Image: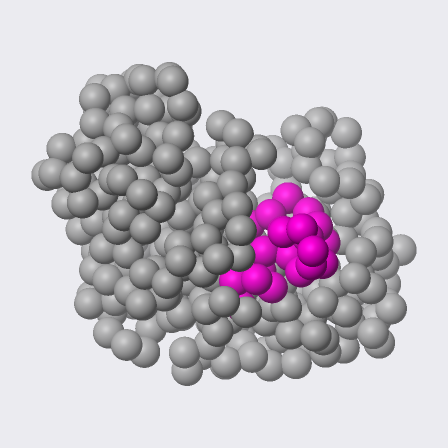
Amino acid sequence: MSSRLAPLYTPFTLNGLTLPNRFVMAPMTRSKSPNQVPGDDVAAYYRRRTEGGVGLIITEGTSPDHAAAANDAAVPRFHGADALAGWAKVVKEVKAAGGFIMPQLWHVGLMRRLGQGRNPEVPPVGPSGLFRPGKRVNDPMTDAEVADVIAAFAKGAADAQRLGFDGVEIHGAHGYIIDQFFWEGTNERADIYGGDMLKRTRFAADIVRAARAAVGPGFPIILRWSQWKQQDYTAKLAPTPAALEAFLAPLTEAGVDAYHCSTRRFWEPEFDGSDMNVAGWVKKLTGKPTITVGSLGLDRIFDGGREPVKATEAHFETLIAMFERGDFDLVAVGRALLSNPDWVNKVRAGELAALRPYDPAELAVLF
């Protein structure tokens, strides 16, 4: 199997950035940054994954400079001199190991509750105050609040460039603030940020445009998005290929260089009548590079359970077949890299028997 995966160990260039292979470390929240400041242990954690063969690291979600962005005071922020100094150390360590890294900018929106995070007194914000269809938890965001969040993402992108990161990923998936604007179930606005599906892309497009203006044309911007929501795993923003094409067009025009297409199982078809997954459809419809993700290298999908998940080569053959026909350009690996910093190198060497299972109970000590 290691020889069959050889095409995934070839270089790839994204907006001038040449990566050594096609493997991406997926963003995974760890809650190991007290006061939201990444320490030396965080820098060492990412360096180990670089030394283990990862072509591109996308960091755990980081909070842009908005008081209501985070719901956990141990999730790292991407603003303030202390936190940015910590991220500068992360970049230094990854670069010393010859790696490439991008921060993920993540605003949780109405996934936050009053009393949570580093600013417990600050209320959460969202497009219409709806956590999910029919459940209102706050008032709609004001125009000023919308503008502040857009500016915070742009500032984060500029700081990423200044610190020496290789690009930036904007988190627009999983029911967080950008996805709350995308989804009709949580966006009932009557202004330019609400309405039909295309109008609901305006907030994300404005964030991408602001970030692009802040970093210029040669700095990669990735948008992570998903059909599913934490509030509803069966939700679909775009139920047909035609709807998906229309949905993506303004985002591509705004300046997205690549799409990180979040699914729970990468091998599952997205639409009836085709075996392509969502990353394949996004690449076909936009012409932009895509990252596929979803339970690669594990014997079962994420189900919230606490039992160890074994490493396996199940679905590797499907992965390479999809890659060889051009469905995606990069593949993100998540939990397997938590337990195995050198997962990419071990898979290349055919050492699957040496891989440790992913054990949620060990997360408190895994670095």
Q: Main secondary structure of the magenta part?
A: loop
Which residue is at the front of the view, 64 or 40?
64
Is residue 156 left or right of 257 when viewed as pictured? left
Which residue range is magenta in the image? Answer: 262-283
Q: Is residue 278 magenta?
A: yes
Quadrant (top left, top right, bottom left, bottom right) of the N terminus: bottom right
For residue 38, above or below residue 55: above
Residue at 33% x, 73% y is: 219
Residue 90: quadrant of the picture: bottom left
Residue that sits furthest to the left in the current view:
144
Q: How far across and down, in percent of the image, does residue 32 sit?
A: 48, 38
Residue at 83% x, 74% y is: 4
For residue 113, above or below residue 72: above
Is residue 123 left or right of 334 when viewed as pictured? left
For residue 20, above or below residue 117: below
Q: How far across and down, in percent of the image, does residue 312 sit?
A: 84, 51
Is residue 38 left or right of 273 when viewed as pictured? left
Q: How far across and down, in percent of the image, does residue 214 sit?
A: 20, 66
Q: Is residue 5 magenta?
A: no
Residue at 57% x, 33% y is: 233
Is residue 217 left or right of 328 when viewed as pictured? left
One can see residue 113 in this view: yes
One can see residue 112 in this view: no
